[in-house]
Image: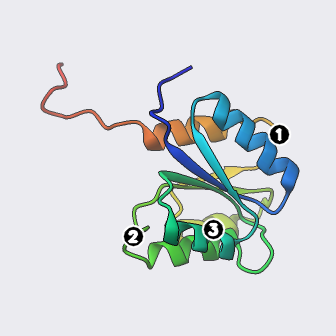
Amino acid sequence: MEQTESKLVLVVDDDEVERFLLRRALEDEGYAVEEAETADDALLYCRVAYPDAMVVDNFLPGKTGVELCEALRDDPATIRLPIVLLTGSKDPGVRELATRAGVSIYLQKTPDPGPVISAIAGLLSPMPNPRTVRH
């Protein structure tokens, strides 16, 4: 298990089973995890706590994941929050909307949490200082 310094990941999905599976996979990697069922719940959570990253299903009741991302990018407190958007849609228009909304990583939803774990690890890993990198 990699050292993650208990980075907090907010999982936003209206499907309880999906949230449970992502929670378990992320916690197994050492992340702290909180959950929200809707975009509005996620926005409220971000006003009182500051997750280090967010995993969001696009198809949520009320606002979509893309709309949630737009709202987060409009707020100075969350403008740089890493966001992984998950979708089962094959519509290329969704990817385009997600990119314009400022989604950090766009992933097709699969039963394997591996791509989500890899995405979060990549987004939260410290960037090397270019002055200390040796060639």
Q: Position of residue 63 (x, y in %)?
A: 71, 79
Q: Position of residue 111 (x, y in %)?
A: 83, 39
Q: Position of residue 20 (x, y in %)?
A: 80, 45
According to the image, label 1 marks what residue?
111
| Classed neighbour count for the residue bearing mark 1: other residues with Cα under 10 Å, few (<14), some (14–19), many (≥20) | few
Q: Nearer the viewer, residue 124 or 94?
A: 124
In three-dimensional space, the C-alpha distance between marks 3 and 2, rounded to whole angstroms, equals 14 Å
In three-dimensional space, the C-alpha distance between marks 3 and 1, rounded to whole angstroms, equals 23 Å
| Classed neighbour count for the residue bearing mark 2: other residues with Cα under 10 Å, few (<14), some (14–19), many (≥20) | few
Residue at the spot 66% in from the left edge and 28% down from the top edge:
28
The numbered disc on residue 18 is: none
Residue at the spot 12% in from the left edge and 32% down from the top edge:
131
Secondary-structure class at tag 2: loop
Dividing the image into 4 quarters, which one contains the C terminus?
A: top left
Q: Amino acid at mark 1?
A: Pro
Q: Quadrant of residue 41?
A: bottom right
Q: Quadrant of residue 119?
A: top right
Which residue occupies the extreme left position in the image? 131
Residue 97 can be seen in this image: no
Secondary-structure class at tag 1: loop
The numbered disc on residue 42 is: 3
Q: Amino acid at mark 3?
A: Ala
Q: Position of residue 71 (x, y in %)?
A: 53, 78
Residue at the spot 73% in from the left edge and 43% down from the top edge:
22
Residue at the spot 76% in from the left edge and 65% down from the top edge:
37
Q: Amino acid at mark 2?
A: Ala
The numbered disc on residue 77 is: 2
Q: Earlier in the sequence, mark 3 or mark 2?
A: 3
In three-dimensional space, the C-alpha distance between marks 2 and 1, rounded to whole angstroms, equals 32 Å
Q: Is residue 132 above or below residue 10?
A: above
Secondary-structure class at tag 3: helix
Dividing the image into 4 quarters, which one contains the N terminus?
A: top right
